[in-house]
Image (cartoon, rainbow, N blue to C red):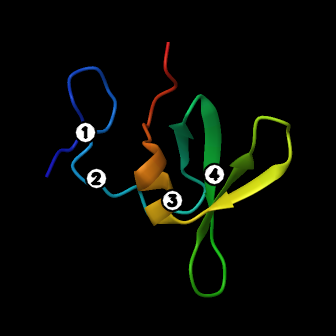
């Protein structure tokens, strides 16, 4: 099922983020990388002050995400 709209962003209907390690997605103007780990993989990026931030897939869905940086 293709969940991308014509402008390359994810549709809001609970689209699942990718599950391939080292994949980069964008959320709220910031990049997040999927890091594999024991148990649940986490999306790792930074907050607006440059501090490390780890998100779950559910967190990322709530915030909204895209495979492409917003222009």
* Residue underneath mark 1: 11
Q: Distance between the residues labelled 3 and 2?
A: 12 Å
Numbered mark located on residue 33 in the image: 4
Relative to 33, say whether 26 is above or below. Answer: above
* Of 2 and 60, the residue lying toward us: 60
Relative to 67, say whether 34 is above or below. Answer: below
The location of residue 26, given as percent across then percent down, is: 54, 37
Q: Is residue 65 left or right of residue 30?
A: left
Q: Quadrant of residue 28?
A: top right
Q: Is mark 3 on a helix, strand or loop?
A: helix
Q: Is mark 1 on a helix, strand or loop?
A: loop
Q: Do the residues labelled 2 and 4 touch (CB within 8 Å)?
A: no
* Of 36 and 54, the residue lying toward us: 54
* Residue underneath mark 2: 15
The location of residue 70, given as percent across then percent down, is: 49, 20
Q: Do the residues labelled 1 and 2 touch (CB within 8 Å)?
A: yes
**In front: mark 2 or mark 4?**
2
The location of residue 51, given as percent across then percent down, is: 86, 47
Question: Which numbered disc, 4 or 1, marks the residue that appears first in the sequence?
Answer: 1
Residue beneath the point at 85% across and 39% down: 50
Residue beneath the point at 62% across and 46% down: 32
Q: Residues within 10 Å of mark 4 (few under 14, many from 20)?
A: some
* Residue underneath mark 3: 59
Relative to 9, say whether 25 is above or below. Answer: below
Q: How crowded is mark 1: few (under 14 residues within 10 Å), some or many (20 or more)?
A: some
Q: How crowded is mark 2: few (under 14 residues within 10 Å), some or many (20 or more)?
A: some
Residue beneath the point at 21% across and 30% down: 5
Q: Is mark 4 on a helix, strand or loop?
A: strand
Q: Distance between the residues labelled 1 and 3?
A: 16 Å
């Amino acid at each position: 099922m293709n969940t991308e709209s014509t402008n390359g962003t994810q549709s809001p209907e609970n689209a699942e983020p990718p599950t391939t390690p080292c994949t980069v997605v964008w959320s709220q103007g910031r990049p997040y990388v999927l890091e594999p780990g024991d148990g649940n993989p986490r999306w790792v990026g930074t907050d607006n002050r440059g501090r490390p931030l780890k998100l779950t897939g559910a967190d990322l869905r709530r915030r909204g995400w895209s495979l492409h940086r917003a222009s």
